Image: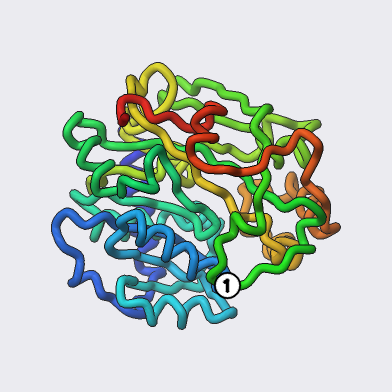
Amino acid sequence: MRWTRRRLLVRALRKHSQLRPVVDRTVAIRKGDILGFSTVRNEAERLPYFLRHHRALGVAHFLFVDNASDDGTRDYLAAQPDVSLWCTGHSYKLSRFGIDWLTWLMMRFGHGHWCLTLDADELLVYPHHDTRDLTALTAWLDARGRPAMGAILLDLYPKGPVGAPDYRPGQDPTEVLGWFDAGNITTKYQPPLRNLLVRGGVRARMFFADAPARAPTLSKTPLIRWKRHYAYVSSTHSALPARLNRVRGLEAGGLPSGVLLHTKFLPSIVAKSREEKRRREHFANSALYETYYDALIANPELWCPESIRLEGWRQLEALGLMSRGDWG
């Protein structure tokens, strides 16, 4: 694992030449600031609420990589006073789905900071997030010598065809995507990385019922007190050193966990699926996902009688999707 980590760090150092700064406000970063990192492409509709939500949680500065957006994403981000922005036209897939670029930014700017690494369609919630911000949470983690917190990706969807609802930029996506699956979550322990791999949810039910092992991974470790020798292995699903993955199950030992509300299924998913099927940049073996994209292009209805209406973090805790642990 040590050599794997070194190889990933070397990759990031080599890939940083692919990034061009658009606006660099990192001089404003202060000691103790919580930082947000994300690679984006054509996310202008999601970013206003994404930023509002995570600013409210306590993220002080955001570092974005824009991967050749053409919908106004770059201009919007460049105008935000708490955002530093880089751009690149290089391959998202060949940069390990943007993680090589973000690893370099975290090496350069994240060392010693709590870093929250997210996709633009992910909204972090955790126990008491409505009354205790990330500053309080990370202080609690620091006091107990815990360098990371895990979360499960929870796919949200509408009632009716995915392309039918109206959504306006800046709107809370959960007002449109109000439903989720909770009863088909599975876990598998992976010894080399010492992590619990979680699968399930609506994508497993609808698109991978015949091949559950190919369903998207839901377990992530998005919040880490970063050191420059750390590295994510596969997106934010696992990290090295392996001790960073002790965030769920028995090894977590009283550690709280969160949920990433996944807003992938906004109405624009139909058009985006056409584009991503053409670009073939989002999966290591894109051919396996041909039918997945075809199903989304067909504007399916994901809701079923067993779907659960989203109510809040206490409901998610009661369902076992997050845990407050010893956090209160």
Q: Is residue 176 left or right of residue 270?
A: left
- At a point 74% along the width and 44% down the height, the residue shown is 288
Position of 295 relative to 212 (above/below): below
Of residues 20 and 117, the one drawn nearer to the viewer in this rendering: 117
Check the picture and name the quadrant holding the N terminus: top left
- Which residue matches tag 1? 169
Of residues 310 and 73, the one drawn nearer to the viewer in this rendering: 310
Residue extending furthest right? 298
Of residues 107 and 202, the one drawn nearer to the viewer in this rendering: 202
> Quarter of the image holding residue 79?
bottom left
Give the x, y percent position of residue 19. 39, 70
Give the x, y percent position of residue 77. 42, 76
Residue extending furthest top? 250
Q: Amino acid at mark 1?
A: Pro
Q: Residues within 10 Å of mark 1 (few under 14, many from 20)?
A: few
Q: Is residue 143 left or right of residue 166?
A: left
> Quarter of the image holding residue 163?
bottom right
Position of 128 relative to 92 (above/below): above
Give the x, y percent position of residue 89. 51, 73
Tally of numbered discs: 1
Check the picture and name the quadrant holding the C terminus: top left
- At a point 41% along the width and 24% down the height, the residue shown is 194
Give the x, y percent position of residue 33. 21, 57
Q: How is the image coloured?
A: rainbow
Residue 197 in view of the camera: no
- At a point 72% along the width and 64% down the height, the residue shown is 267
Q: Is residue 39 left or right of residue 136?
A: right
Position of 147 relative to 170 (above/below): above
Residue 44 in view of the camera: yes
Give the structural element (helix, strand or loop) at label 1: loop
- At a point 51% along the width and 76% down the height, the residue shown is 73
